[in-house]
Image (cartoon, rainbow, N blue to C red):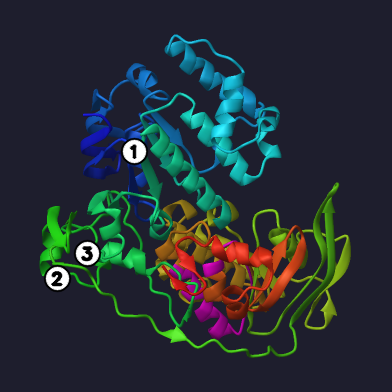
């Protein structure tokens, strides 16, 4: 048959089976989304059917790509004949797939020329302009280098390169995770148009159920390498029948209201070799019974209304109705006297003005958000406040004292960065990382007390960062930031790299710490739903300037500035009047 058919796909490595018995079909012109938390096997499934598994991993199974029958793992000669023209891979970060030292037009020309030669056609430079036009980019982009483009434009160039050889299957692996919400929607709509125009099959890999709503025809939910639920996206995402799918869906953050406690799935995905017997989800499942501990559930059909799909669960017999979360009433409570006052901050990098007369305040125990697209100046503002950049003008005052390079102390403020793996020394055990941070302050914390504070067992002190999940690493990063006893915590995109369920866990933790320790928090994010749940007040930045500020619910539900309205409208699947 045309399109894509995968039967009995498995991936294994030194630690054991990673992906087990995955089967699916993608017809031409349709999109299948694979969703699940990190460690569920999504990306390895995609790499297995493109012949790009990392060294040491092996795939088995049967694959049919547009009439080409392949028994995995196949060989490199076979894959070289399929990649590009039959199957193509679009990665999360366009910097990974684009050469930084070659112009965009030259990179497109390489693929277009090869595709023309395979088809016995002549290659002309006009093909480059046509490829750019197809992804809504002007011809001048051909003369530019990737670093001269915005994130959204770079991803469009990467899409043009991935589609240059007109593949039958496009694998889009987290193609919008590195982009702002406004660019995410544009890229997904572009991919949908190209898929329909070319009658191309598309495999969309994502950890975000909210993002794939409206952009996938079918969905497969993976957990620890096993299919939990599989069927039409309109049914699975609207009325999930597996507890894991329900938990992922419930972890989506609303914009219309603020919740007292964010719904989250406890724990994390087990690593290969540590997976439990029976149903691999039973140790995190609120509905688990004795049978779940010993018996592996089969993937069986289930009917919901006029739709039928498949679910792998001993317990469920229909849609799972989760209890509604408790909503917090929005109030306009004026904050007390400010703990932090940053005023008149200016910062330029060469001819680029990153900050232009920016001022923010944060009161004791208050959580304040800074939002805006990439390049708006959010992170530069945070770095100037934290002392990691020196502003050209303006001052930062904490508790009535002007902060300078000589007067700053670790116990005044600390930063939690976006990527915990990059901010933790991979060669230091958790205990050594925390002891080093304790020594920088005047607190009487112990390593065990810090781990307890962030909800980790004392035994984690002997682990290395590589032994931990993404959420656990971020908890260690938070513990390290708390060790000196700061009064202000700056969170710079500190949950944007996490799965939605883990994101909710960390946001709940930060809320608990704010209440327990009396912390003030400055929260930097491009995600308006995170700001809605985490912050009392918000500042909106554009091109290095503040365009709007106020109580979070007022700014996000009734924005006054046109730019803020644009940001709100770009939130996937949600509107200020209510969640879709």
Nearer the observer, 4 or 97: 4
Whole-percent x, y for residue 455 in the image: 44, 73
Cα gap from disc 2 to disc 1, whole angstroms: 41 Å
Q: What label sits on residue 289 in the rendered view?
A: 2
Q: Secondary structure at mark 1?
A: loop
Viewed as shown, does residue 2 lie left or right of 77? Answer: left
Disc 3: CA contacts within 10 A as few (<14), some (14-19) or many (>=20): many
Viewed as shown, does residue 340 lie left or right of 295? Answer: right
Residue that numbered label 1 is attached to: 29
- Does label 2 or label 3 sit earlier along the sequence? 3
**Vertical placement of 104 versus 174: above or below?**
above
Viewed as shown, does residue 442 lie left or right of 173? Answer: right
Q: Quadrant of residue 534?
A: bottom right
Q: Are marks 2 and 3 in contact (CB under 8 Å)?
A: no
Q: Quadrant of residue 361?
A: bottom right
**Vertical placement of 203 versus 353: above or below?**
above
Point out the stretch of residues depicted in magenta: 504-529
- Total count of labels: 3
Q: What label sits on residue 241 in the rendered view?
A: 3
**Residue under the image location 17 percent in, 60 percent down:** 306
Whole-percent x, y for residue 572 in the image: 48, 60
Depth check, mark 3 against mark 1: the one in front is 1
Confirm whether residue 505 shows in the render. yes
**Vertical placement of 309 versus 171: above or below?**
below
Confirm whether residue 296 shows in the render. no
Q: Secondary structure at mark 2?
A: loop
Single out the residue that lies furthest toward the right.
393
């Amino acid at each position: 048959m045309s399109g894509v058919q995968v039967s009995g796909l498995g991936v294994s490595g030194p630690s054991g089976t990673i992906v087990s018995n995955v089967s699916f079909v993608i017809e031409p012109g349709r999109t299948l989304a694979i969703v699940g938390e990190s460690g569920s096997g999504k990306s390895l499934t995609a790499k297995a059917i493109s012949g790009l598994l990392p060294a040491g991993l092996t795939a088995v199974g049967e694959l049919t790509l547009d009439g080409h029958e392949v028994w995995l793992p196949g060989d490199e000669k076979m894959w070289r004949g399929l990649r590009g023209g039959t199957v193509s891979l679009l990665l999360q970060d366009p910097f990974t797939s684009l050469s930084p030292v070659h112009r965009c037009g030259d990179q497109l020309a390489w693929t277009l020329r090869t595709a023309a030669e395979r088809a016995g056609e002549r290659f002309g430079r006009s093909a480059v302009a046509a490829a750019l036009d197809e992804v809504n980019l002007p011809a001048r982009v051909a003369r530019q280098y990737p670093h001269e483009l915005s994130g959204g434009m770079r991803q469009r160039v990467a899409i043009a390169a991935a589609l240059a050889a007109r593949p039958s299957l496009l694998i889009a692996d987290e193609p919008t995770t590195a982009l702002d919400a406004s660019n995410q929607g544009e890229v997904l709509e572009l991919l949908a148009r190209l898929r329909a125009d070319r009658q191309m099959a598309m495999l969309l890999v994502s950890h975000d159920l909210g993002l794939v709503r409206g952009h996938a025809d079918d969905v497969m939910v993976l957990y620890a390498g096993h299919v939990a639920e599989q069927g039409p996206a309109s049914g699975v995402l609207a009325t999930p029948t597996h507890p894991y799918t329900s938990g992922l869906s419930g972890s989506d953050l609303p914009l219309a209201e603020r919740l007292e406690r964010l719904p989250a799935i406890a724990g994390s995905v087990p690593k290969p070799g540590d997976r439990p017997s029976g149903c691999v989800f039973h140790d995190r499942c609120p509905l688990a019974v004795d049978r779940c501990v010993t018996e592996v559930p089969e993937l069986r059909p289930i009917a919901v209304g006029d739709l039928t799909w498949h679910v792998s669960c001993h317990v469920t017999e229909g849609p799972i109705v989760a209890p509604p979360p408790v909503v917090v009433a929005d109030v306009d409570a004026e904050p007390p006297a400010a703990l932090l006052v940053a005023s008149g901050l200016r910062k330029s990098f060469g001819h680029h003005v990153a900050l232009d007369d920016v001022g923010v305040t944060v009161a004791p125990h208050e959580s304040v958000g800074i939002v805006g697209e990439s390049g708006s100046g959010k992170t530069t503002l945070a770095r100037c406040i934290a002392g990691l950049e020196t502003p050209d003008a303006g001052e930062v005052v904490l508790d009535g004292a002007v902060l300078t390079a000589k007067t700053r102390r670790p116990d005044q403020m600390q930063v939690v960065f976006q990527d915990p793996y990059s901010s933790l020394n991979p060669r230091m055990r958790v205990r050594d990382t925390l002891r080093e941070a304790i020594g920088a302050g005047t607190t009487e914390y112990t390593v065990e007390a810090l781990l307890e504070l962030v909800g980790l067992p004392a035994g984690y002190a002997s682990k290395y960062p590589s032994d931990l999940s993404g959420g656990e690493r971020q908890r260690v990063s938070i513990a390290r930031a708390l060790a000196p006893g700061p009064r202000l915590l700056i969170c710079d995109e500190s949950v944007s790299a996490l799965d939605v369920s883990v994101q909710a866990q960390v946001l709940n933790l930060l809320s608990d710490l704010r209440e327990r320790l009396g912390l003030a928090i400055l929260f930097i994010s491009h995600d308006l739903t995170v700001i809605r749940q985490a912050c009392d007040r918000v500042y909106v930045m554009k091109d290095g300037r503040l365009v709007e500020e106020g109580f979070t619910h007022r700014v996000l539900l009734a924005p006054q500035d046109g730019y803020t309205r644009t940001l709100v409208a770009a939130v996937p699947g949600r509107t200020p009047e209510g969640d879709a």
